[in-house]
Amino acid sequence: MNPRHLVKGALAGAGAGVFASFAMNRFQALVSRLGSGSGGGGGEPSTVKAAERIVGHGIADDEKARAGNAVHYGFGTALGLLYGVAAEAEPWVTAGFGLPFGVAVAAVADEALVPAAGLSGPPWESPPSTHAYSLASHLVFGAALEAARRALLRVL
C-alpha cells in the first residue's frame, strides 16, 4: 500500500467526518422539529457528559451546546479519518455506500461504548424509538461520510 494513498485517505476521511457530523446534526434537528425525536428521557446528551469528563468538571449551561458539539465533531472527524484510511487499505470497507459503517458506529458507539462509559443508561432501558433514531442518524452519518470522502478524494 502506497503511504501517499493512506495520507490522502486520512485527509479525505477526516474532512468527510466533519461533513458527516454536520449532516447528522442537521438530520437530528429536522427530526426534532417534526416532533419525532429520540424518544429518550431528559438529561444531558452523552456528548455533553463526555465533554465534562474530558475537562474534569461541570460545564456552564451556556457552554454545554458548544462543548457537546466539540465532542460530536471530534469523534466524527476521528471516525472519518479511520474510515478513510481503511477504505484506502481495503476498498471493500466502502461497500454499501457507508451504510454498513453507519450501522457499525450506531451498534458499537451508541449501543455499547456510550453505556459502558456511563454516558447513558443501558440499551435495554431505552425505548425502541431511541434505538431507531440512533440507527437512522448513523445511517445518515455513514452515507454522508462516503459521499464526502469520494468528493474530497477527487479534489486531493
Image (cartoon, helix red, strand yellow):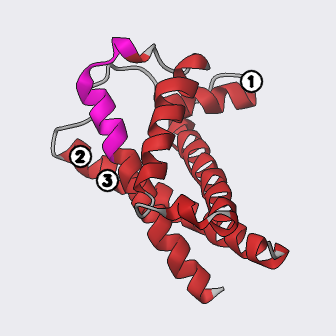
At label 3, the amino acid type is: Phe
N-terminal of the pair, mark 2 or mark 1, is 2
User: Pointer 2: what residue?
Assistant: 31
13 horizontally vs 108: left or right? right
14 horizontally vs 136: left or right? right
Q: Secondary structure at mark 1?
A: loop
Quadrant of the rendering where the N terminus is positioned: bottom right
Q: Residues within 10 Å of mark 2 (few under 14, many from 20)?
A: some
Q: Secondary structure at mark 3?
A: helix
Say if mark 2 contacts mark 3, CB within 8 Å: yes
User: Pointer 3: what residue?
Assistant: 27
Q: Position of residue 154 (x, y in %)?
A: 57, 87
Q: Is residue 57 above or below residue 29?
A: above
User: Pointer 1: what residue?
Assistant: 56
At label 1, the amino acid type is: Gly
For marks 2 and 3, give the CA distance.
Answer: 6 Å
Quadrant of the rendering where the C terminus is positioned: bottom right
